[in-house]
Amino acid sequence: MISRHQVALDRVRDNLLDVMGETVRGLMAEPDVTDIILNPPLPVEPHGRLWVSRLGREREAIGFMSAEQAMRLIGAVASSMNIEATEATPSVQGHLITDGARFQGCIPPIVPGPFFAIRKHASAVFPLQSYVDNGQMTVRQKAIAEDAIARRLNMLVVGGTGAGKTTLVNSLLDTIVKIHPHHRIFGVEDTVELKCAAADQTFMRTSAGVSIPDLIKIAMRSFPDRIIIGEARRGPEMLDILTAWGTGHEGGLATIHSNTAKPEAALERVEDMLMQVTNNPMHRLIARTVNVIICIDRTQGIRRVTQIVSVLGHDGHAYQLQSET
């Protein structure tokens, strides 16, 4: 018997799909679509322009949406979260009730017209071999990544916005399961984006009262073989990640954002985050626990692994890095 709650939930979901309109609804169903954006109308255009990003291609304009429809869509998303979009609360952020995709919407007065950005979940996990086949990774890079996984080295994936960090982590997770099928995987993330086929797995997401450091502490008490972090953004979580990786939970994965997809920039970013929580130099901790850095970049719409580097240590002045590619 279907509960009243489920009936109400289905009604909200159906209303949201209806308000999306045919164009956005169709884009949400396309497996290679990663992002859908509506910009506020330009002075010379009566409606906002829709843009779409697809795997392996540059962002392209796809059509238009009226301000009225966009306002209704943002309002419907807000309603599904039991909040309202008003002039006093013009920003709506969360996850779509339809499929959990990340949503950010804004209405006037903070924008001249309604705006939204949707980040879809990866609809498929691509094996590392597909990166080689598509020219996004060399045969040697694939072998190095597989060797690092087999040896249970801790890996950071670094790149800019839209570089494909999470998609690559999902591919590395797929490789972990193939090489170590009996490992217990514990995942921690802000947004549900990671995909894992391990038989023994627990994935947790932050909430208003539960942070990534809180979840890492839970992970360490849950007998994991590997701890996977969707993205490290702040100092406390980075410190807890490195501590966990350095205390018997080898073979972890995490992503960090960097405008420059270079290993030196990644290590500087880690240092900057740790400086938010401690004034003590953390070079030795970083060098001991971050074993491999994988850099991925997006150029002309193509996501490509540009470099893989091993972190050998810190000599008191600089990190000792060995380029593997």
Image: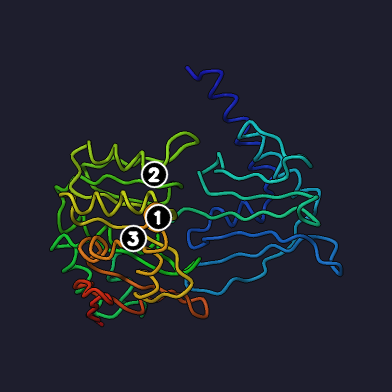
Q: Picture coordinates of residue 149 (x, y %)?
A: 19, 62
Q: Quadrant of residue 180?
A: bottom left
**Mark 2 Cα-neighbour bin, 10 Å: few <14, some 14–19, many ≥20:** many
In front of the other: label 1 or label 3? 1
Residue that appears at 39% across and 52% down: 277
| For marks 1 and 3 on the same chain, the one whose residue lies earlier in the sequence | 3
**Mark 3 Cα-neighbour bin, 10 Å: few <14, some 14–19, many ≥20:** many
Cα–Cα span, label 2 and label 1:
9 Å
Q: Amino acid at mark 3?
A: Val
Q: Amino acid at mark 2?
A: Ile
Q: Is residue 142 visible?
A: no
Viewer-side residue, 154 vs 141: 154
In front of the other: label 3 or label 2? 2
Q: Which residue is mark 1?
A: 232
Q: Picture coordinates of residue 292 (x, y %)?
A: 25, 68
Q: Picture coordinates of residue 159 (x, y %)?
A: 42, 69
Q: Is residue 313 above or below residue 17?
A: below
Q: Amino acid at mark 1?
A: Ala
Q: Quadrant of residue 311?
A: bottom left
Q: Which residue is mark 3?
A: 169
Pointer 2 and pointer 1: residues touching (CB < 8 Å)? yes
Cα–Cα span, label 1 and label 3:
13 Å
Residue that appears at 29% across and 57% down: 253
Cα–Cα span, label 3 and label 2:
18 Å
State the SS at label 2: helix
Pointer 3 and pointer 2: residues touching (CB < 8 Å)? no
Q: Which residue is mark 2?
A: 212
| For marks 2 and 1 on the same chain, the one whose residue lies earlier in the sequence | 2
